[in-house]
């Protein structure tokens, strides 16, 4: 093993985390005692926070020059913030962790040990969560469907706490894909990986800004980016709906001709038309999701805009 010092960058997306920052920064700084062979670099990305997050980060930076602060021009979302952080991280390996301390930073010690033996992707996978039943239900359903319909072998509890090699960072930045899930993209790259299970802790400070709307967007982005299943499902629905309609039409004609049933009113026809129109609208909406992403990629707008950097 090389005796050269390792530069280890840690990327932390920040969005309304003023209550967490006074606890997160010192805890990350204490990692130096656990990682004596490393030169640490902390890259905090302010994703358009309107609280005192940026002010606290700049105060911390004035006391520790290892801290970089990247300020985005507005809120672009956590995935874009992570992309920005990766672009400014210069380490031989890069860790990604949330600012709310629900994931234990001390696990980077074990992750780094795996990286040293040529594991380019080391994932902190959630074996359980100290969260409400509804949050667990949504998360477990999302990751179950993602594994079954998009990315085979994807960790059942998901992950967003990890360590990756410099090569993986460069590959993610080279792709420059918008409206995607960075974690799923890293998994999709297919490098040798290690999974380290842990229990995600309950959030102690502040309120989560991970709203239902953002969860739904991530759900759609993940499946549109990594699976053709929605299109395939539409094809099956279209085929079986057409088959059912043909069979029903033959049944009505046959029954009317032979007097088995008496054709009355329009209730059945209206019900069938309404059902079929509903199916068509769902299909058009699904196709629209794909078309919107194609349009968004063709515009070649950046995933994020840097307002200021402090490094």
Image (spheres, rainbow, N blue to C red):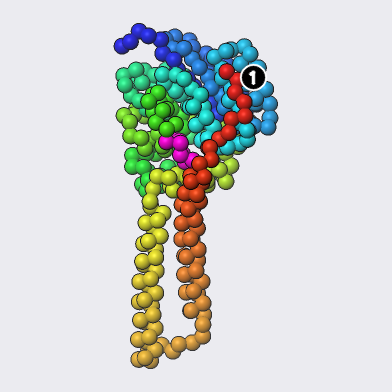
Residue 30 coordinates in the image, percent (x, y)? 52, 13
Q: Which residues are magenta?
A: 175-183
**Residue 116 coordinates in the image, percent (x, y):** 34, 17
Quarter location, residue 263: bottom left
Q: Position of residue 250 (x, y in %)?
A: 35, 81
Q: Main secondary structure of the magenta part?
A: loop
Residue closest to the far top = 3
For the view shown, which residue lies furthest in the front direction? Answer: 299
For residue 125, above or below residue 6: below
Residue 125 appears in the rendering: no
Residue drawn 46% across and 52% down?
A: 290
Q: Quadrant of the N terminus?
A: top left
* Residue located at (44% from left, 23% from top): 94
Q: Quadrant of the C terminus?
A: top right
- Where is residue 238? Give x, y as percent: 39, 65
Q: Nearer the viewer, residue 14 or 304?
A: 304
Is 78 on the left-hand or right-hand side of 252? Answer: right
Total tally of numbered discs in the picture: 1
Residue 236 visible to an observer of this rendering: yes
124 lies above or below 287: above
Q: Quadrant of residue 117?
A: top left
Tell me what residue is drawn at x 39 percent, y 48 percent. Answer: 227
Quadrant in the rendering for residue 6: top left
Residue beneath disc 1: 58
Asked if residue 310 is positioned above or below residue 303 in the image, the reply reads: above
Name the one closer to the observer, 136 or 232. 232
Residue pictured at 47% horizontal, 70% vertical: 276
Check disc 1 and report its element: helix, strand or loop.
Answer: helix
**Residue 122 painted magenta:** no
Q: Which of 76 and 267 lies nearest the eye of the viewer? A: 76
């Amino acid at each position: 093993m090389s005796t050269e010092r390792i530069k280890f960058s840690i990327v932390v997306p920040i969005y309304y985390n003023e209550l967490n920052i006074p606890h997160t920064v010192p805890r990350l700084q204490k990692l130096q005692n656990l990682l004596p062979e490393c030169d640490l670099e902390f890259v905090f990305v302010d994703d358009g926070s309107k609280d005192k997050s940026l002010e606290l980060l700049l105060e911390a930076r004035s006391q520790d020059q290892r801290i970089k602060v990247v300020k985005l021009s507005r809120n672009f979302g956590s995935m874009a913030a992570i992309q920005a952080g990766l672009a400014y991280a210069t380490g031989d390996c890069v860790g990604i962790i949330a600012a709310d301390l629900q994931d234990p930073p001390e696990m980077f010690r074990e992750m780094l040990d795996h990286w040293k033996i040529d594991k380019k992707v080391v994932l902190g996978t959630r074996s359980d969560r100290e969260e409400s039943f509804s949050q667990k239900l949504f998360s477990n359903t999302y990751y179950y469907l993602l594994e079954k319909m998009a990315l085979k072998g994807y960790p059942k509890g998901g992950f967003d706490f990890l360590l990756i090699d410099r090569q993986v960072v460069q590959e993610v930045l080279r792709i420059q894909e918008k409206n995607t899930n960075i974690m799923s993209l890293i998994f999709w790259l297919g490098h040798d990986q290690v999974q380290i299970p842990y229990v995600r802790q309950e959030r102690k400070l502040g309120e989560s800004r991970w709203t239902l709307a953002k969860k739904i967007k991530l759900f759609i982005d993940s499946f549109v980016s990594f699976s053709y299943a929605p299109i395939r499902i539409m094809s099956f629905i279209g085929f079986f709906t057409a088959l059912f309609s043909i069979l029903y039409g033959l049944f009505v004609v046959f029954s009317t001709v032979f007097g088995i049933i008496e054709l009355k009113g329009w209730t059945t026809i209206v019900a069938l038309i309404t059902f079929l129109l509903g199916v068509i609208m769902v299909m058009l909406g699904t196709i629209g999701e794909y078309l919107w992403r194609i349009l968004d990629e063709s515009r070649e707008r950046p995933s994020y805009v840097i307002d200021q950097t402090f490094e």
